[in-house]
Amino acid sequence: MRAYTTARWIVLAVIGIMVTLLPELSPTYVSSSIALPTLTTGLCAISLTFLSTYGGLVSLAQTGLFGVAGLLAASLAVESHVDPALAGLIGIAAAATAGLLFGALASSSTGTYFLMITLALGEISYYLFSAVPAFGLHEGINAVFPPSWLGDPVRHPTAIYYFILLVAVGFHLLLRYLVRTPFGMALQGVRDDPERMTALGYNVRVHRTLAFALAAAIAGTAGVLAAWTNTRISADSISLGVTIGVLEAAVIGGMYSLEGAWIGAFTLTVLSIYGPAFTDRYATVLGILFLAIVLVSPGGLTGVLTSIDRRVRHALSNQQLPALADRGASEQPRG
Amino acid sequence: MNESIVRLRNLSKSFAGVDAVQAVEMEVTPGERRAVLGPNGAGKTTLFNLIAGAERPTAGAIELFGRDVTNLPAWQRARLGLARTFQTSRVLPGLSVEDNLYVAALGADGGHLRFVANRRDARLRSRARGAAERVGLADRLRSSARDLSHGEQRQLELGIAMVAEPRLLLLDEPAAGLSRAERQLLTQLLLSLDRDVTVMLIEHDMDVALTIAERVTIMHYGRVVLEGTPAEIRADQRVHDIYLGRTYAV
Ligand SMILES: Nc1ncnc2c1ncn2[C@@H]1O[C@H](COP(=O)(O)OP(=O)(O)OP(=O)(O)O)[C@@H](O)[C@H]1O
Ligand SMILES: [Mg+2]
């Protein structure tokens, strides 16, 4: 048992070190083509996972909000020559505001209705952006660059990698903190039984709307960062296909925990890069993989990992029967 | 103070084709223990839903604590000091017992849009643990509500309503599905409630209901057919005809 726990820590530490030292350990290509998309997709996915896991709300509007921030920031920076950092912040604020509005519209429903309303909102964003010349129509906005202190995101992605890693870790920790605050505890109550919460004095709609706006700010941040790392963004960056991709990332990673968003985004990014080289039926294979994961483990890859972990611990602890039997007995009295 | 805690005037609720509650007039005074009895489908739960704001009346008016709340949403009525239990337990399955009680206390406290836990939360948590103790769940604080037995869920349901320290407590069949021993504990608990709390109780178990209640309202087909003391109710032939006779025979 001790050895296993240690081994587990070592694996986690190795992953941590690899993530931390990635630009030193790997060619530029890995940072720019795998790491950066993983982080920006993961950030968008975690906004979805957060809403779903802690608010019981599965939203298809996250890429729409990603686009609100990304396109607005890109347009301000490129067309209006606003400082990119400021343009980014304005974009994120706009996404949060749109999130308040979307949230207010969608928050009286749940389940399929919520899914449909958010899908409609996402689609409206897409069609709106693809019709407005200021946002570059379908060609999009090119030559979008991050603030100069982040360097060239394509040829020298080290600085921007660390910056986005910091943002990602920051949001992850923020969400983990948030769900234990009074607001977060109440949000989980709203997820479990909105009618019960209403009877306890909670304004369920306001609660959902605020959670939605917060998730919108995170999705918006992902949009700005993605525009910077890709040096371009267009309405097609938020098409239905992308929306589904983010949903797939969240589901493949596992919607029962925030970590799932990163695992799913990484898996999907790697598959989308190397998959097509192995098979020209990439989309079909991905679909089958998706189906398999959903069928085998509703908790996605994270669910698979935790259940393996639990089984190993269980198997190992059975070998130490005496110690555990004692504890089991003292926990027994209630049947 | 002779102001009433609950005053219902000509209160009616119809669902497609069903007059669940019809022209109900009722007054409940501060500190009173009121039982609402009647056969299945009499409209008792609907009456509670109307008082709590979970349903909107088709006609009539509702006053709580001397204030017209007919158009006030349910969550605002809860903030005024109303708490309720549901006929089938409505605990929060994804949260622990302690977190269930904490969230319930937090709702009444009105501070749930805070993003930083502070001293108030420490106080609410200790209140939550106190409530767990009162309803006999002190040793289950860390258990997920989903893992509780039926009886324990009933206990938690009651704790959730009580931890809010309400002025008006609506209990919808709290004894349903409980063992005889559990019923006795429940009766003791309800008898021990502070007199600051007004209690309305729907209960099919006559022993529980008539031990606790000072006044009894009998409903039948959505109407109030009789109101009186437990003794009057026991003696009334109509009540035996529509309800008590059958239940007592069991
Ligand atoms: N949401 C609803 N939609 C349609 N009809 C309803 C609804 N709620 C209650 N009813 C009907 O209203 C009537 C009263 O129901 P209610 O649940 O208030 O009775 P009750 O006295 O609580 O009964 P029980 O003792 O079985 O709990 C019943 O005929 C019921 O079918
Ligand atoms: Mg009922």
Image: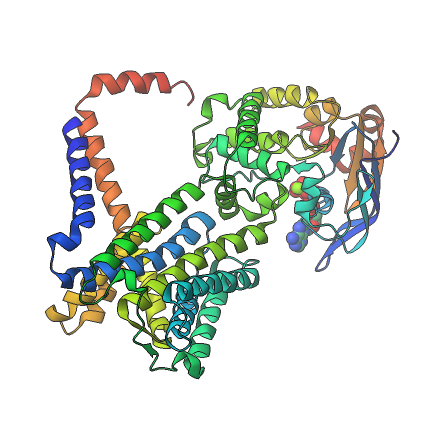
Residue at x 44%, y 53% (from the top left corner): A51
Which quadrant of the figure contains the N terminus of chain A? top left
| Residue A312 location (% of width, % of height) | 19, 35
Q: In the image, is residue B121 above or below residue A217?
A: above
Asked whether the viewer can see residue A136, the reply is yes
Residue at x 21%, y 41% (from the top left corner): A308
Asked whether the viewer can see residue A299, the reply is no
Nearest the viewer among A63 and A155 is: A155
| Residue B5 location (% of width, % of height) | 80, 35
Q: Quadrant of residue A58?
A: bottom left
Q: Is residue A144 left or right of residue A119?
A: left
| Residue B179 location (% of width, % of height) | 56, 24
Q: Is residue B134 left or right of residue A317?
A: right
Residue at x 19%, y 36% (from the top left corner): A9
The color scheme shown is rainbow
Residue at x 49%, y 34% (from the top left corner): B99
Q: Quadrant of residue A245?
A: bottom left
User: Among all residues in the image, which is located at the extreme right?
Assistant: B2
Nearest the viewer among A225 and B117 is: A225
Nearest the viewer among B162 and B48 is: B162
| Residue B50 location (% of width, % of height) | 73, 47
> How many discs mark residues in the rendered view?
0
Q: Quadrant of residue B41?
A: top right
Q: Is residue A189 left or right of residue A155?
A: right
